[in-house]
Amino acid sequence: MMAVSEQFEFEIIFSLPPGEHDHFILSDAVIEAGFEDALIGTGNPKLLAVEFVASGEDAESAILNAARAIMSNLPAGTRLHEVRPDLVSLADVAAKLDVTRQTLQQRDMPLPVAGGLYRIDEIASVIRRAAQREKGRRRPRFHPDRV
């Protein structure tokens, strides 16, 4: 069976090594990595932001493959600083909260972004609401302070 490729939109932020970096050379490095349509941010001299759409079997592999391709063209000492949006699985969230994944699924959860991954900020707001005590209802089982 052939793997299905999906499209994922995300932003990768790289931490650049100390020194002066030409914005045009940085932009060319992203384009040479195969991301001609990327939005490239060079406003902070210590960071390079790249927002684009990439294809892959899952979000994680698409992000990692894109980051590796771009980093191979950037100055030595460049590091992966951040990936946005921060994506999490319900299993990861459930483990942190010490509840089952099914407990989370009983809540009014946001739609997954890609392949069972959710934006962490959307999940966090659901958890905060679920952790609030409501009059006439059982004590909430969520403990967001653990996460």
Image: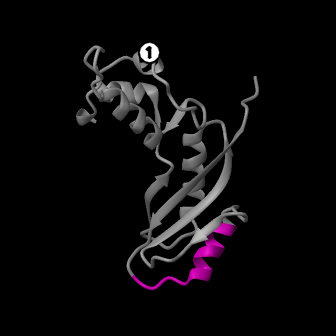
Please name whichever residue, 69 or 21, is drawn nearer the observer in this view of the structure: 21
Residue at the image position 48 percent from the left and 53 percent from the top: 83
Disc 1 residue type? Gln
Q: What is the quadrant of the N terminus in the image?
A: top right
In this rendering, the answer to whether 137 lies above or below 39 is above
Residue farthest to the front, as pictured: 135
The residue sitting at 62% across, 71% down in the picture is: 29
Position of residue 25 in the picture relative to residue 95 (left or right) = right
Query: Up-down: is 143 above or below 15?
Result: above
Report the span colored magenta: 19-31
- Left or right of 29, for residue 71: left
Q: Position of residue 99 (x, y in %)?
A: 33, 19
Q: Nearer the viewer, residue 57 or 41?
A: 41
Left or right: where does residue 17 sit relative to residue 111?
left
Question: Helix or strand or loop: what does disc 1 sit on?
Answer: helix
Residue in front for this viewpoint, 70 or 147: 147
State the image coordinates of residue 35 (x, y, percent, origin top left).
Answer: 69, 62
Q: Position of residue 107 (x, y in %)?
A: 45, 21
Does 39 appear in magenta? no
| Residue behind mark 1 | 102
**Label 1, residues with CA under 10 Å away: few <14, some 14-19, many ≥20:** few
Residue 43 place in picture, x, y as percent: 50, 77
Above or below, comparing residue 129 to residue 36 in the picture: above
Task: Classify the position of the C terminus by image quarter.
Answer: top left
